[in-house]
Image (tube, grey):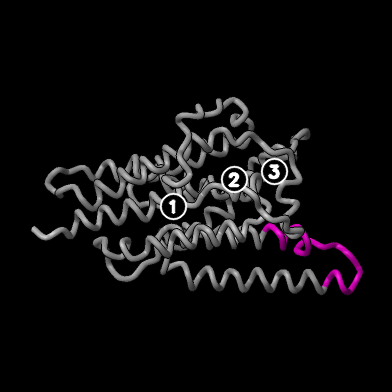
Amino acid sequence: MPLSAPRQPTLMRSTQTLRDTQRPSSAWVGWGQWLALITMTVDHVTRYLMPYSWDVGWASSSIGRIAFPLFAAMVAWHALFNTRDPMRYARRILVIGLLAQLPYMSMPRYGFQLNICFTLALGLCWGTLLYELARRSLFTVSTNKHAWGKAIKAWLAVAASLAIWWLVGPWVEYGHRGLLLIPFYMLALQALNQPAETLSERLGATAATLPVLLVAGLMNNSDMAKAFTVATCLAVLLLAAGAASRVPQIAAGARMPRKLWLAWYPGHFAAIAVLLHWPG
């Protein structure tokens, strides 16, 4: 999946302040990539290929629930700290989603649904839009009519984005809650990365993490799945709060090959589709 930041991103003035704060270490991402691909593959193999009589659904409800919140965390992390052009980053994710959609649609499911890349890309676009609107216009306090006009337009844009979220939600994997995860991650990661010297600042940073954990808790049905999803989100929040600096760099020989990282999502669905529908 295209979840690593572009190597040579173009400078975009509108997203420059996403990196105004000191960048935290991203060493954990190298480990997270392997974990995300392994847990996602376990989820899909047990869900689509294992016979029902084997009773391995527990793997999908536990290990498999790590993948999506981890992918969403890496997207939000890169958007905030590692790329100057989140929209270009979102377009790259959409390309992979388009390539994966056909084999994804061959999996057993009820009705049409867009795969997880669409959830991630749309969540990233929405999170970036909300961040920019909040930074520029939403909380303007001024007697200047022009400033108030910008603030009103910004609030209308937020209302329009909520309407789009409501309409698009049923068509993407993980639905409305999945689309919320990256914007809430961006809010939490940005708050946790800010210096917090006073009690009110620390309380504010803590409060910013609550929407992520709430959505994670509501995202799945079983208690086991909820626990693994919330635990994954909590681990990422702890990394943002300072634990990332303690994570060692992954060895050069163990790093995820870029081509493998980009090709795995559509490729593994294509392999599962062949095995699932092979004659005989």
Q: Residue at x 78, y 34 (%)?
A: 198
Q: Nearer the viewer, mark 2 or mark 1?
A: 2
Question: The residue under label 1 is which amino acid type?
Answer: Leu
Sequence-wise, the earlier of marks 2 and 1 is 2
Question: The residue under label 3 is which amino acid type?
Answer: Gly
Sequence-wise, the earlier of marks 2 and 3 is 2
- 10 Å crowding of disc 1: few (<14), some (14-19), many (20+): few
Question: The residue under label 2 is which amino acid type?
Answer: Trp
Q: CA distance from mark 2 to mark 3?
A: 20 Å
Judged left or right of residue 192, residue 66 is left
Q: Residue at x 22, y 57 (%)?
A: 274
- 10 Å crowding of disc 2: few (<14), some (14-19), many (20+): many
What segment carries the magenta color? Answer: 131-148
Sequence-wise, the earlier of marks 1 and 3 is 3
Q: Residue at x 50, y 27 (%)?
A: 251
The disc at residue 218 is 1
Q: Which residue is mark 2?
A: 77
Mark 1 element type: helix
Relative image position of residue 68 (x, y in whole percent):
43, 49
Depth check, front residue: 29 or 274: 274
The disc at residue 204 is 3
